[in-house]
Image (spheres, grey):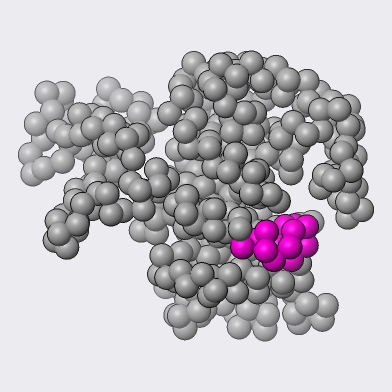
Amino acid sequence: MLAARTGVAGSQISEENSKLRKQSGLSIGSKDRSPKKASENGKDSSLGPSQQSQLRARQLALVREVEMNWYLQLWELSCEHTTASTTGMPHRNLGKSGLRVSCLGLGTWVTFGGQISDEVAERLMTIAYESGVNLFDTAEVYAAGKAEVILGSIIKKKGWRRSSLVITTKLYWGGKAETERGLSRKHIIEEIVRAMTHVINQGMAMYWGTSRWSAMEIMEAYSVARQFNMIPPVCEQAEYHLFQREKVEVQLPELYHKIGVGAMTWSPLACGIISGKYGNGVPESSRASLKCYQWLKERIVSEEGRKQQNKLKDLCPIAERLGCTLPQLAVAWCLRNEGVSSVLLGSSTPEQLIENLGAIQVLPKMTTHVVNEIDNILRNKPYSKKDYRS
């Protein structure tokens, strides 16, 4: 999948299915057997917008379960043969498209072709793949194109089926020449929407999305696509973590309900700030110690950075109570948002990746009570206009 960037610098599954059957079993069929009176538009008038959204999500999940069971029965297979069952990795639809992606993906920014060796990169991809990750993210600008080459070489060496993987890359910052960067047709093969439609029609990609676009820009792209019978974007790649919430929690949900654009989020640990490694300064081996990341160091040692570190210390007791690490709590917090299709992880060591993948085990523990506890500590929950009206 291509993303256009702006120029800005096992058992848990069975239990979930059981709950879905109980909650949505009466919602599917030729007749409405629900004892509640439905409104003319087919929605329960007693449910609020958020409850109706959750109900629709459960209905879609049940439909997917029925379709999967039918497919497995057709080929004389069982649920044990599926990746989700063997690895425990949940999969979600990318927006309202039919593309199924692992809820955790592996990113290659800074690491592949830069901070780590090719051998470590191969080890990281192997761990991710064997853990059920099918989404791998890169970009033409990462390590001046080396990240894409390394990722492709590892896939070829491992002999993984290309059809089992979802590879996303991003365009904008390309070569040094003026014609090698930007989003012109010259660079990507009329501008953006038409170019992306051409790329998909030629078989060079199956979907396209955006990265770091505003809600207005995404809506404009969708409108142009519909007006001229072209292909609209299916997702937006956005930064999302404990200290960056506005876009993913307020702006993107509205786009999802209106035009089906999903959220693929990155930097769940805020470039390592939430990892806990910067609690007592900037370690020499950390990303913030690199010359090209002076901006990150300045953010950490700033007054706001110190306030964030204090909040992280207040979150540690919650992590300890849930039996997880602070990074695992932070990643699970991102995943608890049903509007997030997948969270991209960035790791420089196998140990870090294994730890972050463990967030899957913490996700069921992210109850409303726990989320409210975290919000009370952070005190940065964004409010939409609907929230104010209510």
Residue 232 location in percent, x, y?
A: 47, 64
Task: Report how many numbered discs are placed on residues in the image.
Answer: 0
Residue found 28% across the figure and 54% down from its top: 81
Residue 35 location in percent, x, y?
A: 11, 23
Q: Nearer the viewer, residue 97 or 359?
A: 359
Residue found 26% across the figure and 26% down from its top: 45
Residue 83 location in percent, x, y?
A: 36, 53
| Residue 303 lies in quadrant | top right
Left or right of residue 232: residue 380: right
Q: Nearer the viewer, residue 155 or 190?
A: 155
Q: Please report the bounds of the magenta region as a residue range.
A: 110-122
Residue found 54% across the figure and 53% down from its top: 127
Observer able to see residue 300: yes
Left or right of residue 367: residue 306: right
Observer able to see residue 262: no
| Residue 125 lies in quadrant | bottom right
Main secondary structure type of the part rendered in magenta: helix
Q: Is residue 290 magenta?
A: no
Location of residue 235 with respect to 228 vertically, above or below: above
Residue found 77% across the figure and 26% down from its top: 308
Left or right of residue 324: residue 36: left
| Residue 298 lies in quadrant | top right
Q: Nearer the viewer, residue 332 or 120?
A: 120
Location of residue 185 with respect to 155 vertically, above or below: below
Left or right of residue 7: residue 333: left
Location of residue 328 with respect to 175 vertically, above or below: above
Q: Is residue 118 magenta?
A: yes
Residue 293 location in percent, x, y?
A: 86, 50
